[in-house]
Amino acid sequence: MGYRVAFLSLHGCPVARLGEKDTGGMNVYLKETAKHLGKLGIKIDVYTRVHDPNDEEVIQLGINARVIHLKAGESNQKKEDLYRAGPEFVENVLRFQKHEKIEYNLVHSHYWLSNYPGITLSKSWSVPLVSTFHTLAKLKLRAKAEEMESIRRIESETDAVLRSDGIVVSTDSEVLDINQLYVKSDKTFDDSKIKVITPGVNLQVFQPGNRSKAKEKLSLSSGKMVLYAGRVEPLKGIDIAINAISKLELNEVVDLIVVGGDSTSDTIVAELKELARSFGIYKQVKFVGSVRQSLLAEFYRAADALIFPSYYESFGLVALEAMASGTPVVASRVGGLPQLIKNGETGYLVPFRCPESFTEKLEVILSNPILQDAIGASARRDAMDYSWGNAAKKLARFYFSLSGQYSLASGSDIKIV
């Protein structure tokens, strides 16, 4: 029968187009961990709601890994209201599981919207529950007070922290955050159940290349270019990036290319364009929308630097992708980014909300090609230590530690070394 895990991701689909609203690093995480766990011989079913009516119910991600689309809520339901779809999601997961005669060894829930389904299904199947939050409401509120995070979400995260058998986080800082913000004085909480497993990066897709050729391939100007990649939303600090670019004092014009966003972010894009106009750099700021990963890799290679001005990042997969591409990163000193970037060696860390600090470090990189190449080379070397294969092996070992009937050598089809 083998070892089988149910991934629960009510709102995030591994095959969704990246860079659009509510898609990003978590979607990559789901896809890559599922695929690499599958390669180890562990069967992974990723349950998510139907996002695109054209999607098939079951889509193979790779060996032993598949996505299962189930109805849960209305197609146009807002993300903040999706918790209401939890019971329907659970009901349809159970229906699919019974129809397929599947038995799971463990449930792994992703993001707070999957907390209720995770707790309910792990109890129904009498199997361990692992939770990965990806972002935490209390941290988002601390970073940007005007963020709208519900009391319901905070209560859900607190409940899941206490009731999960295991919690997977990406960085050491997340362990500290959970202990300080969610556990506090709860004497019953055992923080040994929190496991730090750093995500990986696709080193074949994201690799260095000729910057000039990449710019030519993308039909970009041959001048200096700073890249922003990710969702287009206030918490990502794109306004800070525009402000920082406007303050550059160099002998040539520097463009800011924004990769990410979709039709739902049109209002924010319009506001950002108006901001660029007010700073006198309207023609230098270009929004290209969301792109497939192979094209995103070309943008990384074309960039002279990546600007990553987020107010909050639990890890910062975009920064790692840029590093793997040999592109220097100037990032906010928030969340897991200090664990990822060696300040002055593989990039620069600066205070968030401070455009002047971003400007200063961008000028250092853009005015010194030798330093730019040296930082890019160091970044690539560091990125080589982050592989999805290694992350999957650590995750599998953690799963087995919670499933008493399994060990690393259990089952001839499970290949972990």
Image (spheres, grey):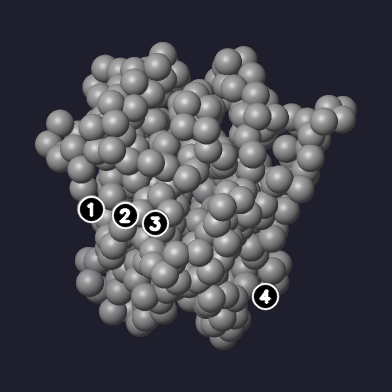
Location of residue 162 by image quarter: top right
Height in image: 100 above or below 336?
above
Q: Position of residue 77 (x, y in %)?
A: 32, 18
Q: Position of residue 39 (x, y in %)?
A: 37, 66
Mark 1 or 4 closer to N-term?
1
Name the element at disc 4. Answer: loop
Instruction: Please name the residue shown 34% across and 27% down the image.
Output: 94
Looking at the rendered structure, the kind of residue marked 2 is: Ala
Q: Are marks 1 and 2 in contact (CB under 8 Å)?
A: yes
Q: Are marks 3 and 4 in contact (CB under 8 Å)?
A: no
Name the element at disc 1. Answer: strand
Mark 2 or 3 closer to N-term?
3
- Between marks 1 and 4 in the image, the one whose residue lies nearer the viewer: 1
Residue 224 in view: no
| Residue placed under numbered mark 1 in the picture | 60
Looking at the rendered structure, the kind of residue marked 1 is: Gln
> Dot 3: few (<14), some (14–19), or many (≥20) neighbours within 10 Å?
some
Q: How many numbered discs, if any? A: 4
Q: Position of residue 206 (x, y in %)?
A: 39, 71
Residue 2, numbered label: 3
As drawn, which residue projects farthest toward the left?
A: 54
Mark 1 or 2 closer to N-term?
1
Closest to the observer, 412 or 344: 412
Mark 3 or 1 closer to N-term?
3
| Residue placed under numbered mark 2 in the picture | 65
Looking at the rendered structure, the kind of residue marked 3 is: Gly
| Residue placed under numbered mark 4 in the picture | 345
Mark 4 or 2 closer to N-term?
2
Looking at the rendered structure, the kind of residue marked 4 is: Glu
